[in-house]
Image (cartoon, grey):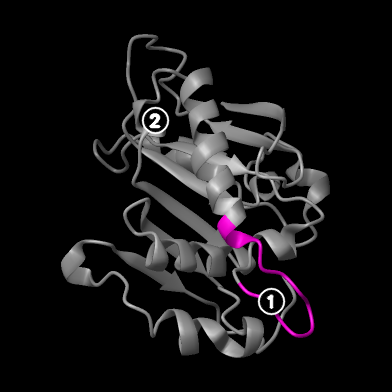
């Protein structure tokens, strides 16, 4: 099941947007059950088959809800734990919101404000609307994103590991701002495997050197 929280306003000054919340199969079957696993995912309007994906996304929908339903309900016990997914919609300001610095060509640089919005506005709202999602009330929260969302996720995990961990960064736009993430962010002190902040990073064989998404 996917529920959409409509027109979530940002006290931080960002654009108003929807937030889609995936609830696992047992959520409506067992009204006493609490949920301790929650995942934050960027580009919420690109995630779920049940919500808008047939029209909004030029490169196709992730189908997160369909995939999770399949694995959670699989006959093999323990194949996958139940998880709630909080999909924060993007807006026309996506490039600004998912980048931490200003690229000479594309601008940007509002990611820290966006992360504050996620922490201070989105997650408390999810905790209020879905009280049984106990993990929404306090981090650290796992986070996932692709492209600019992957860049944002790696930045969040590296610079704010106490709030966002573990993280999954897919096809991340590390080309941003002259590969500044490698030259600047990674050079700063950050989490290491010994500090239990896991990073999952992958990319496809057809990745371009610069893609504006």
Magenta stretch: give its range: 101-112
Query: Which residue: 72% across, 45% down?
Result: 13
Image-based side of 4 in relation to 22, left or right: right
Which quadrant, please, contains the N terminus?
Answer: top right
Q: Which of marks 1 and 2 is in front?
A: 1
Q: In this view, does 100 lie above or below 28?
A: below
Which quadrant, please, contains the C terminus?
Answer: bottom right
Q: Mark 1 points at which residue?
A: 102
- Considering the whole magenta stretch, tell me its main secondary structure: loop
Query: Which residue: 69% across, 76% down?
Result: 102
Q: Position of residue 50 (x, y in %)?
A: 67, 34
Using the image as rendered, state which of residue 83 and residue 72 is in the foreground. Answer: 83
Image-based side of 86 in relation to 157, left or right: right
Inspect this view and state whether residue 73 appears: no
| Residue 137, disc | 2
Which quadrant of the structure image shows residue 173? Answer: bottom right
């Amino acid at each position: 099941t996917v529920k959409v929280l409509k027109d979530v306003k940002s006290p931080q000054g960002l654009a108003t947007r929807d937030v889609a919340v995936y609830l696992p199969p047992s959520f409506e079957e067992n009204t006493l059950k609490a949920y301790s696993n929650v995942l934050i995912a960027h580009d919420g309007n690109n995630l779920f088959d049940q919500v808008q994906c047939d029209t909004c996304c030029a490169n196709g929908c992730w189908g997160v809800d369909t995939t999770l339903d399949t694995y959670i309900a699989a006959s093999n016990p323990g194949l996958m734990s139940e998880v709630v997914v909080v999909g924060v919609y993007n807006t026309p300001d996506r490039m600004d919101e998912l980048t931490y610095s200003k690229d000479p060509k594309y601008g940007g640089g509002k990611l820290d404000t966006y992360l504050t919005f996620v922490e201070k506005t989105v997650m408390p709202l999810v905790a209020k609307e879905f009280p049984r999602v106990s993990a929404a009330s306090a981090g650290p929260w796992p986070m996932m994103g692709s492209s600019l969302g992957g860049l944002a996720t790696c930045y969040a995990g590296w610079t704010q590991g106490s709030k966002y961990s573990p993280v999954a960064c897919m096809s991340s736009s590390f080309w941003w701002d002259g590969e500044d993430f490698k030259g600047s962010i990674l050079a700063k002190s950050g989490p290491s495997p010994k500090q239990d902040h896991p990073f999952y990073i992958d990319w496809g064989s057809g990745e371009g050197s610069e893609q504006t998404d």
